[in-house]
Image: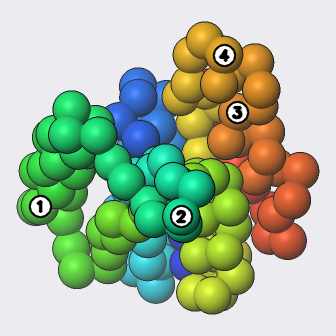
Amino acid sequence: MLGSKLLVGYDGAELSSRALDTALAQLRDHPQITVDVVYVEEVAKLSNGVEVIDDNVQHRNDTLFEQLQNKVKDISARVHLHRLSGQNASYVLLRFAEEHNNDLIIVGSRGLTGIREFLGSVSHAVVQHSLVPVLIVK
């Protein structure tokens, strides 16, 4: 058993789907496990402190979260979906894990491309700063 209170970071990428599948597989064998799935909507912050999401990005977020809901709709009540927002997905995941006492974080190894990946992936930041074990799925 990987843990009893799992946190999965989900962004719609193939590797985050694999991370979710890894966590859901644990549910079948261990009835005491719960899974928190966190979808983070990354937002831009204006100079006045107001957070904004572009309409195209919002539509993409809505679509991905709906796909996530459909993926887990037939699974037990031990899966809890959370749609959060923030400028930094790794910070949001780490804070959630701390506030909800998750004992394992599961993330895909890569979900970003281009310049954002060069600057640092979410999985890398989570591994570097997590106070609980992290499982990286490739």
* C-alpha span from label 2 to label 1: 39 Å
Q: Earlier in the sequence, mark 3 or mark 1?
A: 1
The quarter in which the N terminus is drawn is bottom right
Position of residue 80 measured from the top left corner of the image (x, y, whole percent): 32, 74
Q: Nearer the viewer, mark 2 or mark 1?
A: 2
Position of residue 116 measured from the top left corner of the image (x, y, whole percent): 65, 25
| Crowding near the residue tagged with mark 2, few <14, some 14–19, many ≥20 C-alpha atoms within 10 Å | few
Instruction: Check disc 4 and report its element: helix, strand or loop.
Output: helix
Name the kind of residue labelled 2 in the image. Asn
Residue at label 1?
73
Q: Quadrant of residue 11?
A: top left
- The correct choice, above or below, for 86 with respect to 6 in the image is above
Q: Residue at x 53, y 28 (%)?
A: 111
Instruction: Check disc 3 and report its element: helix, strand or loop.
Output: loop
Q: Residue at x 79, y 39 (%)?
A: 124
Given residues 45 and 70, the one toward you in this image is 45
* C-alpha span from label 4 to label 2: 26 Å
Q: Nearer the viewer, mark 3 or mark 2?
A: 2
Name the kind of residue labelled 1 in the image. Lys
Q: Nearer the viewer, mark 4 or mark 3?
A: 4
Residue at label 3?
121
**In the drawing, does residue 112 fall left or right of residue 54?**
right
Q: Nearer the viewer, mark 1 or mark 4?
A: 4
Q: Earlier in the sequence, mark 2 or mark 1?
A: 2
Name the kind of residue labelled 3 in the image. Ser
